[in-house]
Structure formats: structure tokens, C-alpha cells
Image: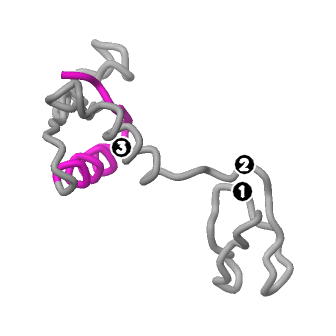
Amino acid sequence: MKRVYGSDDRMLVGHLHEMLEAHGIASMVRNDYLGGGAGELPPNECWPELWVVETADWERAKALVEAQLGPTMTTSWTCPGCGETIEGQFAQCWHCGHKAPEEA
């Protein structure tokens, strides 16, 4: 077994687990219910983790997870629909609903 991903977001880890299973990669979520231990244990040690059962599947699983998560824009962009300046983490304009341009 080998760890592929960990996050404080249980929903995201669960989604990635289901995605790997759909691609025929046996995986499991560890620490799924360990969140109650935060405070007694370091918080990041309580995060849910996604593990592949077969180490040979790790590279493929890692590539699928990275493709699913995609790149995160860190620079602001200007909405082509209304001219509003939008922070980089958002993919859609809050003002008019226009999607971020691909080159942003």
C-alpha cells in the first residue's frame, strides 16, 4: 500500500477514492473518522488519506488525482464579460457568472 493524497476535506478525499475505483484502481481511505482526535493529535495527522492497495498502481493513481485536482490559478484575472477583477482561485465571475478565460 502507498499513500496517494491527504486533505482536511473528507468529501474531496472520498470523491477521489470513488474516482480511482471507477478507473479500476483498488484504494482505501484511512483516518476517515480520526478528525475527533484533532487537539490531542496534530491536526494534519488526523486528515483523511487516500491509499492505493497495490503499489504498482501508485503512479497511475497519482496522475489521475493530479489531473482531477487540476492547476490552481494564483493570479487575479479580469472578467471578459464585465471587467471585474477576480481573485485567482475562482473559475467564474461572482458578478456576471462569466467563466475565467483559459489563458488566465
**Residue topped by disc 2:** 74
Judge whether 99 appears above or below 71 on screen. Answer: below
Q: Amino acid at mark 3?
A: Asp
Q: Amino acid at mark 2?
A: Thr
Q: Magenta stretch: residue 100 in it?
A: no
Residue at 24% from the left image edge and 34% from the top image edge: 57
Estimate how packed mark 3 is, as few (under 14), some (14 to 19) or many (20 or more) residues with alpha carbons within 10 Å. few
Residue 9, percent from left and from top: 36, 43
How far is the residue under mark 2 from the one under mark 3?
A: 20 Å
Judge whether 83 appears above or below 28 on screen. Answer: below
Viewer-nearest residue: 74 or 35: 74
Residue at 16% from the left image edge and 33% from the top image edge: 33
Estimate how packed mark 1 is, as few (under 14), some (14 to 19) or many (20 or more) residues with alpha carbons within 10 Å. some
How far is the residue under mark 1 from the one under mark 2?
A: 5 Å
Residue 36 is left or right of residue 61, and the answer is left
Element type where label 1 sits in the image: loop
Viewer-nearest residue: 38 or 63: 63
**Residue topped by disc 3:** 9
Viewer-nearest residue: 12 or 64: 64
Q: Magenta stretch: residue 5 in it?
A: yes
Residue at 79% from the left image edge and 76% from the top image edge: 79
Element type where label 3 sits in the image: loop
Q: Which residues are magenta?
A: 1-21
How far is the residue under mark 3 from the one under mark 1?
A: 20 Å
C-beta proximity under 8 Å, tags 1 and 2: yes
Residue at 29% from the left image edge and 31% from the top image edge: 58
Judge whether 40 appears above or below 31 on screen. Answer: above
Residue 79 is left or right of residue 32, and the answer is right
Q: Mark 2 or mark 1, which is nearer the start of the sequence?
A: 2
**Residue topped by disc 1:** 88
